[in-house]
Amino acid sequence: MPKIAVVEDDRTLADLLRYNLNRDGFAVVTAADGNSGLDLIRREKPDAVIMDVMLPGIDGFEATRLLRRESHVPVLMLTARSDEIDKVLGLELGADDYLTKPFSMRELLARVKVMLRRDETAKREQGPVETSTIRSGEIELDPVRHVLLVSGAAVETTPKEFDLLQFLMTNKGQVFSREGLLDRVWGYDYPGDSRTVDVHIRWLRQKIEADPSHPKHLLTVRGFGYKFEE
């Protein structure tokens, strides 16, 4: 039985989510603030997380950012505002999907199932795990330890930033469209759009390029997409 962690401070909504998820065949664990939510996720190791944005203590954005340092667990964010910036920020920080309140419970359940299916498909299609360090000039990527080194110094990345860089470094010199990268790195049914790729490329440039405004590794191929060069 898949387990879902619900991090929501509105008790009525949390109970409603628990009821509907239970009825649909999911086990549910809950927390009412960001800090206890992170502790819950670390302890219970759920298959997916439903995370409210507005939480006591640390908010859902910060909780998701911290979670992404240590876990690839799918995260669906709930936001009370329809502002695009909230949605984009959530995706930038590593959320897999988002819903704006009020929402249809049927849609939420469908999105949770899509996240779980996409996560399972990605695990099956990963194939043999790359065990050797990938090197390019001053950049070293260790897939086993999930460590990025730039000029010998460890650089922190989110899991999705790491996956994107690993994919591009593994396919050096090949050009990939934004849509192609969404399919290969995020999954074919990812609900976000191509701006997600642009944001992650920008963040990676800030971390690996000596001059992010004039990159030498993560290059834009105008009118098409991106590639990685030595």
Image (cartoon, grey):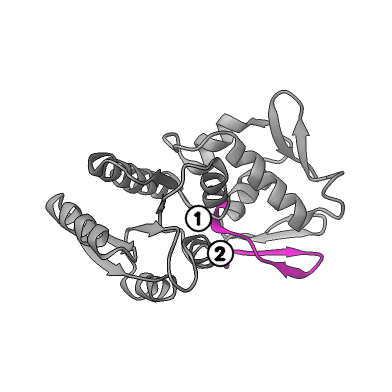
Left or right of 155? Residue 50 is left
Is residue 108 or residue 205 the one in the foreground?
A: 108
Q: Is residue 170 visible?
A: no
Q: Position of residue 216 (x, y in %)?
A: 84, 44
Q: Earlier in the sequence, mark 1 or mark 2?
A: 1
| The N terminus, quarter of image | bottom left
Task: Residue at 28% x, 39% y: name it.
Answer: 107
Q: Position of residue 46 (x, y in %)?
A: 32, 64
Q: Is residue 228 visible?
A: yes
Please name the amino acid that badge 1 sits on: Val
Task: Residue at 12% x, 52% y: name it.
Answer: 23
Left or right of 42? Residue 132 is right
* Marks 1 & 2, CB-CB < 8 Å contact: yes
What is the magenta range? 144-160
Q: How many marks?
A: 2
Element under disc 1: loop
Q: Position of residue 192 (x, y in %)?
A: 49, 38
Q: Position of residue 210 (x, y in %)?
A: 86, 55
Residue identified by numbered label 1: 129
Residue identified by numbered label 2: 144
Disc 1: CA contacts within 10 A as few (<14), some (14-19) or many (>=20) = few
Q: Residue furthest left?
A: 23
Is residue 62 or residue 149 the one in the foreground?
A: 62
Task: Indicate yes or no whether the magenta region holds residue 149.
Answer: yes
Res 66 label: none
Is residue 190 or residue 165 the one in the foreground?
A: 190
Task: Indicate yes or no whether the magenta region holds residue 53.
Answer: no
Task: Quadrant for residue 134, please give it.
Answer: bottom right
